Amino acid sequence: MSAQDLPLELRRALAAVARVPRLLVASDYDGTIAPIVDDPAKAYPHRESVNALRALAGLTGTTAAVISGRALRDLAALSRLPVEVQLIGSHGSEFDVGFVHAIDNDAKQLLQEVQSTLTQIAQDNPGATVEIKPASVALHVRNASPEIGRRAVVQVRQGPASWVGVQTTEGKEVIELAVVETDKGAALDIVRHQQGASAAVFIGDDVTDEKAFTRLSGPDVGIKVGPGESLAKFRVDSTEDVSKALAFILEERRTWLAGASAPRIERLTMLASPRSKALVTPDGTITWLCHPEPDSAAVFAHLLGGPGAGHFAIHPERAGLPLSQRYKDGTMTVETRWASLQVVDYLPHDVVPERTDLTRVITGDTKAVITFAPRPEFGQVPVRIVRDPAGLRVQGTNDPLVLRSPGVDWEIIDEGNHHTARATVDPRQGPVVLEMRCGTSDLAPCMTSEIDRRREAERYWSDWAATLELPPLKPDLMKRSALTLRGLVHAPSGSILAAATTSLPEDIGGVRNWDYRYCWLRDASLTAAALVSLGSVGEAEELLDWVHRVLETLPGPERLHPLYTLYGETLPPEAVIDQLPGYAGSRPVRVGNAANMQVQLDVFGPIVDLISQLAHAREHKGISDPKKALPDADWDLVHAMVSAVQRRWREPDHGIWEIRGNPRHHVYSKVMGWLTADRAITLARQFGRTADPEWEKLRDTIADEVKAEGWNEEVQSYTAAYEGTDLDAATLHIGLSGLIDPSDPRFAATVVATEAELRSGSTVYRYHHDDGLPGGEGGFHLCAAWLVEAYLLIGKREDAEALFAQLVDVAGPTGLLSEEYDPVAERSLGNHPQAYSHLGLLRCAQLLSQPVLPRLSGTSAHG
């Protein structure tokens, strides 16, 4: 029995309704989940229907109900459905077993008279039987001859059915008289309202079910079983088909809720070109790729919606797990290897700005199966795939999309709204090269060979990596972290992504799912500073040019938003993609980020700190002229940032973690205001610039206030915000930045309190206070890195080394780190790969590679 036997249009409708936030699935009983039989007492339901209803009732946001003409007690006894499935009897008039007590005395008297009269009619008409219910009496004529059955029904119509106070319902070979109002449609609406259902499915076979069909609208789905006129939009032939339909809804709903095929986040590997980013799963599936920019809509959103959301898979014909997946050393090329098969993936660099290209090369000694299922615009645009002698053309999208695959014999599969292409290839005849090209309809061969294109892409990364001054501790992992940070650079604009993904959850199944595919001033500055510390200054220079362009659009630097699109524009409003179930069922899937409109007054510090590190790096590279080491444009930016702090530092803000609550006077934000002035003063002194006399007063005023207002005697620690007792790992920056001397006992006390309150095994949480959002989150890798640094500052080197070792251990098999870590479930959480995590890891390795810790420059972060 297969759901594929159901009509295609019905499957499409059910697949769509299965994706609503709250779903009601309701059904009639006889002739729907149970076959019509001569003896009503033996009308047992199909086991498959019972199993499906039970399972549906157990799903989150899902209600299952049976609305029957049978008496509720009989329905419960016969159906054997569990209590999770809501049973409603007597055509919607019985919602609970104690219903009979709700009938008044007049109704009870009328019911007795109806029962007596129908019993007499049954006696006069052989084969007719009476069924007595708490508020009604039914005359069944199924076992009478057609002529006698018609006669008996006419007698009921002309007799008690015409009495005042009697409600009549006629069905297949049954007429029922009730002394209370009965209406399956009203019952359906009651359940819908009680459960807050976004949409309903109702399945029925009888005339009485039409009252329920009349109540359906919008995304609701009505299914009529068998022949006859009906208001239901869809129809199936039999009760067996009902079982198929229920099973289909269950599978679609379960898949949508659970987020099918969700690989562990830390095992995802990033592909990158100077502009584009993609993720590949451990088994060689392209699970995430956006076009035309990394912050655009996804072509492959498998990561957030399973196969139906778009994917590009390759695996051996004889299925088996891969033996390994790794980067080619010093590059962003990824090799996935099975016993007799290898797939090489990379994003070519020699493409025009409007294109996103992906190349996949298959080699080996066994056949491979390819599945190509592009779903542009997060799968919201129906696509058709057309074969071409040189490959495939994807139709229905605003932007052209092709897959060059000469010699591959494709099968096109119609999956309703979309096409999927599938093929089996034999690489023993030579490498199979697949070239996906977004933004062009050109299927012609490239001017350069695939080998040369790959070599060009790999040189871009390896030549750069060869110039780095990497710490000697864990050198391979450090190189990968550096490459990951550069992989998050968006070269066309000079901006830097916080992470490559959106909506990977901070809490599996929760709502803390944010879009990080943008450029945060803080994150980007920290990333660029980390690359400067490795000897690469180009990324920092490009980023500062980007900041200048952003400032040109503002009335003043104090109006900087915390984040922008990759091209420095204001983000559109945060939106939700309801059609996607989210990673492992974690919804909503968000596009955009409302933090864009928050007040975050720490952002000025990381920019000035980056300029400071960049000036010293230029000096280190032999630029002796102070004006060239700290050029006018950079110094102007320093002035702008200090000016912004002067104007706004006294305000409360939403803080580094972008808490969606009321603004507070966050200690970290004040520290970053202090750092802005402090670094500006130091730069002026070291590079022959003139500092505003007010800057020292600003620096000292902030420091005095933070020391006085940020400390809490009760908890013996600097706290998250003034007048609070809650701790925040970011407050460690009061010592990491140099605002207080690391030898100050209050800093050591803050480190101890942070460890006790926020550290859990191998990770450190940002905070534990109520932030107004449901659910929890993992520990932050960056916070763990801060604690490593703090341990070193207070002389706890062994603790620092131990925590660093734990941080290293949670990196994925290809060396990538996401945003967070769950120490209980021992799995990564949050968007991936995360710039914060990798720059924190690099910072720890650099510090631990030094025998003596020097005075540190400041660092900072976001949530």
Image: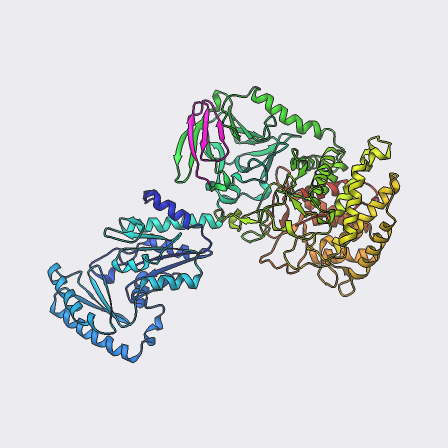
Quarter of the image with the N terminus is top left
Q: Return the residue found at the far bottom.
A: 105
- Rendered view: 424 above or below 156: above
Residue 706, horizontal then vertical, whole percent: 80, 57
Q: Is there any visible trace of residue 848 in the rendered image?
A: no
- Rendered view: 756 above or below 388: below
Span shown in magenta? 381-409
**690, 601: nearer the viewer:** 690
Q: Return the residue found at the far front.
A: 555
Residue 118, horizontal then vertical, whole percent: 18, 71
**107, 640: nearer the viewer:** 640
- Rendered view: 286 above or below 764: above
Q: Which color mode does the image show?
A: rainbow
Instruction: Please give left or right for residue 232 compared with residue 432 in the image.
Output: left
Where on the picture, by quarter, is residue 345?
top right
Does the segment drawn in magenta span residue 694? no
Does the segment drawn in magenta span residue 389? yes
Where on the picture, by quarter, is residue 554?
top right
Residue 829, horizontal then vertical, whole percent: 60, 48
Q: Residue at x 79, y 41 (%)?
A: 636
- Rendered view: 757 above or below 353: below
Instruction: Please give left or right for residue 744 compared with residue 805 in the image.
Output: right
Q: Is there any visible trace of residue 809 in the rendered image?
A: yes
